[in-house]
């Protein structure tokens, strides 16, 4: 089976996110020794590096770590489905979204398997607007979901324009 070039772009985005995510986490763990330090003030009070061991999912759900393997398996299945979807995709924005989400999901799975938790360290809680600490993988998933929604809106709009053009 020949993999379409556009699908390769999604896999490339995913690989790039995984590499950047794991490199930044390695830097935080080893280079900054953030686990031992706890917090490094970068741009007070807006931005800090803060050590958080996320054993659950959003908003502390499964925070006791009991769902480690279930969450890992779920993320792997989601990444697999996204990888299959990339084979069928034909729009650049959609492929970008798929690659970002897939890479983010796998980046966090690597942590869950290695450490039993996800390493979070990007802390913008000083703004008073965004209280969560997150990582590169989380950011990629969030941006990917936004792009997925945008692609859906744009492709729906394009389909309506195409139908209107056919009727005239």
Image (cartoon, helix red, strand yellow):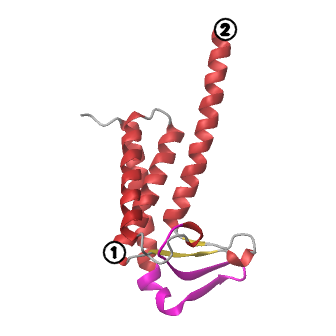
For the C terminus, the quadrant is: top right
**Residue drawn 51% across the image and 67% down it:** 57
In the picture as drawn, the residue positioned furthest to the right comes out as: 128
Q: Position of residue 91 (x, y in %)?
A: 50, 34
Q: Indicate the quadrant containing the N terminus: top left, top right, bottom left or bottom right.
A: top left
Neighbor class of circle 2 (other Cα within 10 Å; few <14, some 14-19, many 20+) is few
Q: Secondary structure at mark 2?
A: helix
Mark 1 or mark 2: whose residue is earlier in sequence? 1
- Judge whether residue 11 can be spotted in this image: yes
Do the residues under discs 1 and 2 have CB atoms within 8 angstroms? Answer: no
The residue depicted at 39 percent of the width and 60 percent of the height is 106
Q: Which mark is residue 17?
A: none
Picture residue at 47% right of the left edge, 75% below the top: 55
Image location (x, y in percent) of residue 16: 41, 58
Quick check: 97 left or right of 108?
A: right
Q: CA distance from mark 1 to mark 2?
A: 57 Å
Residue 30 within the segment the image draws in magenta:
yes
The residue at 51%/40% (across/down) is 94
Viewer-proximal residue among 94 and 20: 94
Q: Considering the numbered disc 1 on the image, is that residue within a helix, a strand or a loop?
A: helix
Does residue 19 appear in the picture of this structure? no
In percent of width and height, residue 155 lies at 59, 31
Q: Is residue 34 above or below residue 104?
A: below
Q: What residue is disc 1 on?
A: 114
Residue range of the region highlighted in magenta in the rendering: 28-57
Q: Residue furthest top?
A: 168
Quadrant housing residue 26: bottom left
Q: Which residue is mark 2?
A: 167
Percent across and percent down for residue 68 are 40, 70
Residue 60, magenta (yes or no): no
């Amino acid at each position: 089976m020949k993999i379409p070039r556009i699908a390769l772009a999604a896999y490339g985005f995913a690989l790039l996110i995984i590499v950047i995510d794991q490199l930044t986490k390695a830097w935080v763990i080893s280079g900054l020794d953030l686990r031992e330090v706890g917090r490094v003030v970068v741009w007070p009070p807006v931005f800090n590096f803060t050590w958080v061991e996320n054993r659950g999912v959003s908003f502390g759900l499964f925070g006791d770590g009991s769902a480690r393997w279930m969450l890992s398996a779920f993320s792997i299945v989601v990444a697999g489905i996204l990888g299959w979807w990339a084979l069928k995709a034909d729009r650049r924005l959609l492929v970008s979204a798929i690659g970002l989400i897939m890479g983010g999901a796998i980046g966090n799975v690597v942590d869950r398997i290695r450490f039993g938790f996800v390493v979070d360290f990007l802390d913008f809680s000083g703004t008073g607007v965004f209280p969560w600490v997150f990582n590169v993988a989380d950011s990629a998933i969030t941006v990917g979901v936004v792009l997925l929604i945008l692609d859906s809106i744009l492709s729906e709009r394009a389909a309506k324009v195409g139908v209107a053009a056919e009727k005239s």
